[in-house]
């Protein structure tokens, strides 16, 4: 009788406190990479396809709330409770720059050409730091009336997006520093991501996940989820999206209909962040339990450390792959 393949996630240990944010690089000649922000103050860099530890960035003196890599994985940045945003060399682990703030830095992101760093903080301001002339004063936008939860570049760096505890998402024109649009949400627990092609803004808010176009920032669709969702991410081909939150499960939904496709309970604490890899072959989740987990988008496919075992190798002659249970079909080689 045919049985369903079981999802076997890769668990990436090393952190000692909740993992609150993660980010993938683009695909480089050396593959792609994953950075994680953690309340233990020790952001970590990993090989994206396998989760193998590459290094830890040592220098913050407080919880790290935001972490990011540029597309080429040639620069990393972190934001922390020690009121600083730092830029790092991922090859050597050296700290390149440290930018002082007046409050906790919650979000960091590089511009497309990596010459500027955007930060969002509990100062309620957006700041753009010039990485070519690091001594220059940052460009500032007084963006919100409460703490900024996340901030990012959009529309080929012509726009900024910021989300705040004041229950608003604001879109800003970079050249004029003026507000283009304000979207009022039903909760201050907001997380924002952008699709790989930059065309869609993904917003998790309460028990909903909403999608907006990034031309006029009009809403495309909204789906209700089974619980409060802290983070969501859209697959690069836009066939599905993932979300994770308070019930410890990670969900995969059909993007067209919102139908739940899969759900898995692998973490032992609420999920704070989820992201698809740049090739869409896996997705990562970070949790209150202090771990990162990597999940296969297509079960049973040989990829990274997931190795498909042919039926005859497992001693199951005359048995097709679809007829084999997951522990017999897929093994994780660590």
Image (tube, grey):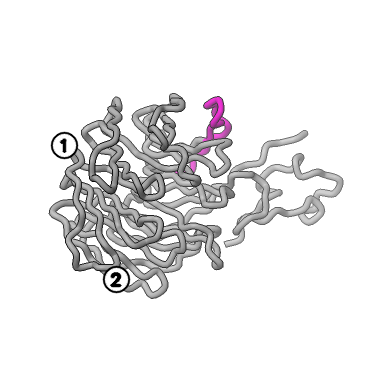
Q: On the picture, is 196 further left or further right than 85?
A: right
Number of marks in picture: 2
Look at the picture and state if 275 lies above or below 246. below
Confirm whether the magenta stretch covers residue 299. Answer: no
Look at the picture and state if 133 lies above or below 254. below
Q: Residue furthest left?
A: 102
Q: Secondary structure at mark 1?
A: loop
Q: On the picture, is 161 further left or further right than 266?
A: left
Q: Find the magenta span and give its range.
A: 252-267
Residue picked out by circle 1: 145
The residue carrying pointer 2 sits among few (fewer than 14), some (14 to 19) or many (20 or more) residues within 10 Å by Cα, namely some
Image point (49%, 46%), residue name: 196
Percent coordinates x, y for residue 252 in the rendering: 53, 36
Percent coordinates x, y for residue 146 in the rendering: 17, 38
Confirm whether the magenta stretch covers residue 255. Answer: yes
Q: On the picture, is 160 further left or further right than 214?
A: left
Percent coordinates x, y for residue 136 in the rendering: 19, 64
Percent coordinates x, y for residue 69 in the rendering: 40, 59
Look at the picture and state if 38 lies above or below 164. below
Identify the image quadrant of residue 205.
Answer: top left
Residue picked out by circle 2: 95
């Amino acid at each position: 009788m045919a049985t369903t393949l079981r999802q076997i996630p890769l668990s990436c240990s090393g952190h000692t406190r909740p993992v609150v944010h993660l980010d993938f690089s683009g695909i480089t000649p050396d593959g792609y990479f994953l950075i994680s922000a953690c309340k233990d103050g020790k952001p970590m860099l990993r090989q994206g396809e396998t989760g193998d530890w590459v290094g830890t960035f040592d220098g913050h003196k407080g919880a790290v709330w935001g972490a990011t890599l540029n597309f080429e994985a040639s620069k990393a940045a972190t934001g922390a409770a020690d009121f600083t945003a730092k830029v790092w060399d991922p090859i050597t682990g050296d700290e390149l720059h440290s930018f002082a703030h007046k409050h906790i830095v919650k979000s960091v992101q590089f511009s497309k050409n990596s010459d500027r760093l955007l930060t969002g903080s509990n100062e309620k301001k957006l700041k753009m730091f010039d990485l070519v002339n690091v001594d220059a004063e940052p460009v500032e936008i007084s963006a919100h009336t409460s703490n900024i939860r996340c901030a990012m570049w959009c529309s080929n760096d012509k726009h900024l997006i910021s989300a705040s505890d004041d229950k608003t998402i604001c879109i800003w024109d970079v050249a004029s520093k003026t507000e283009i649009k304000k979207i009022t949400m039903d909760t201050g627990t907001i997380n924002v991501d952008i699709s790989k092609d930059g065309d869609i803004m993904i917003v998790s808010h309460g028990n909903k996940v909403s999608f907006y176009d990034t031309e006029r920032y009009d809403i495309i669709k909204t789906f209700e989820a089974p619980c409060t969702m802290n983070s969501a991410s859209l697959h690069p081909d836009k066939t599905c999206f993932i979300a994770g939150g308070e019930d410890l499960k990670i969900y995969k939904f059909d993007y067209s209909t919102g139908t739940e496709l899969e759900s898995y309970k692998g973490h032992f604490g609420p999920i704070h962040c989820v992201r698809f890899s740049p090739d869409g072959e896996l997705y990562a989740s970070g949790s209150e339990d202090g771990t990162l987990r990597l999940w296969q988008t297509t079960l049973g496919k040989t990829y990274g450390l997931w190795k498909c075992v042919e039926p005859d190798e497992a001693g199951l002659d005359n048995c097709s792959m679809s007829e084999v249970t997951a522990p017999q079909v897929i093994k994780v080689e660590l």
